Image (cartoon, rainbow, N blue to C red):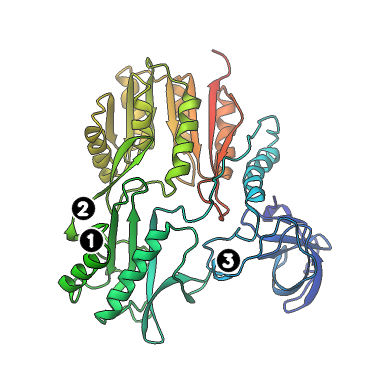
Amino acid sequence: MFFIKEEKNMGNKAPVNKNEKLTVTIEDLTYQGMGVAKVEHYPLFIENALPTERVKVHVLKAAKNYGFAKVIERLSTSEQRVEVTENQYLQTGIAPLQHLNYEAQLEFKRTQIVELLSKVHLEGIKVAPTIGMTEPYHYRNKAQVPVRAVNGKLETGFFKKNSHTFVPLEDFLIQDKRIDEVIKEVRDILREFNIEAYDERKHNGVIRHIMVRRGYYTHEVMVVLVTRSKRLPMQEQIVEAIQAKCPDVCSIIQNVNQASTNVILGKQDKLLAGKEQIKDQLNGITFNISAHSFYQVNPLQTEKLYKAVVEGANLTGKETVIDAYCGIGTISLTLAAKAAKVYGVEIVPEAVIDAKLNAAANEIENVQFETGSAEEWMQKWEEQEIKPNVIVVDPPRKGLAESLIESAVKMGPDKIVYVSCNPATLVRDLQLFLEKGFKVAQPIQPVDQFPQTVHVESVTVLERAEK
């Protein structure tokens, strides 16, 4: 796996020039899935190019230490290449690995972790094969699709990477097929009632995004119409038409976002029809999901991920567990069946409200959820002489703050189970845990939550080196 900052061009000038045509051999893949070719040790990053392939390229950019190029002609083809007919999935970044066969994708994700460990001299930590999917397409249970006018016609689609160029799409490849169908139906209804698409340059128009969520097990569907305007023209007729065309839609919400921003959802929701939340299950536990809820987008793989967490925690029913980034309670409630007591903490108040409702709906009583930072509550729980046997952390991509690592270690758990969505910050944080007397107790387990993309989740079990 190639990392940009490692290469240094000692001269003052790149050995290639912008617009130059070259023939090169691809040697590696970057962690973003781009092919890497070397010209006099100078790396060129090339989209839609795989190791071993010989390609003719056109240099797009030549910075001092690295450049970018595009393939003009492929002279040889990797055995790992999958021929794709729809280039827009690569262009928009929806599926940047769709040209790499799935077995190779799984190994690519494992290798990300292996090579990051190697860079900090932690080669002794083993990484298990990545847990994949039988059908690695159409897995996302949530879509947030921009709406724009193309030649005067309202369209749904996606933007090309690093641009404002809009690409109309109907099949999004990695979304639940029913979600794609609902988006098309809603798009056609909006066209029928002449609803204006949002224009980001002029900051006018009505519909900015269509968001659809679908319960994998319940099949309940939520439609969120994100509008620039407070008023949705023809509101009643639109709602009636959606309900008639899509009887599985049991929640229709208008979200108002009047800001000139690339943030998708605004703060104001209006329930137009049905209920405010839909339901779904994970490992037999029912969850209520609102428009703003964080809920894992790949339910089948999330069940495997949480199974790895449960196995890593290895609970007997006597343990006290802290879930330091509990969200709406998905991991906390999964562990509660095997623990004596679970304490969850989350900084987002709405998520904590959802977590408490989810616990009540499932009649799970041995959980306690608090609002605030994990460090703050760990200190309070320590003052209350609560001694966790296991601490679970599932942080955002930026990983753990050093102060949280210190707080977790200070509480003296037997185990820390680290659920990571970013191998780089995982490896950084593991170094701190190792310095503070913990060891990695078993091979790190990668799980492919996002097939056809470069992202990988993983579960790491840490134990105190000396018990």
Real-space Cα distance between discs 3 and 2? Answer: 35 Å
Q: Residue furthest left?
A: 236
Neighbour class for label 2 at 10 Å: few (<14), some, many (≥20)? some
List x then y, in percent, for residue 134: 55, 46
Query: Contact, CB < 8 Å: mark 1 with mark 3?
Result: no
Query: As shown in the figure, which amino acid type bears the numbered disc 3?
Result: Leu
Query: As shown in the figure, which amino acid type bears the numbered disc 2?
Result: Glu
- Relative depth, front residue between 63 and 57: 57
Horizontal side of 342 relative to 395 (left or right) equals left
Q: Residue at x 72, y 62 (%)?
A: 65
Real-space Cα distance between discs 1 and 3? Answer: 31 Å
List x then y, in percent, for residue 23: 82, 71
Q: In what quadrant of the picture does the C terminus appear?
A: top right
Which residue was labeled with disc 1? 253
Which residue was labeled with disc 2? 276
The image quarter in which residue 13 lies:
bottom right
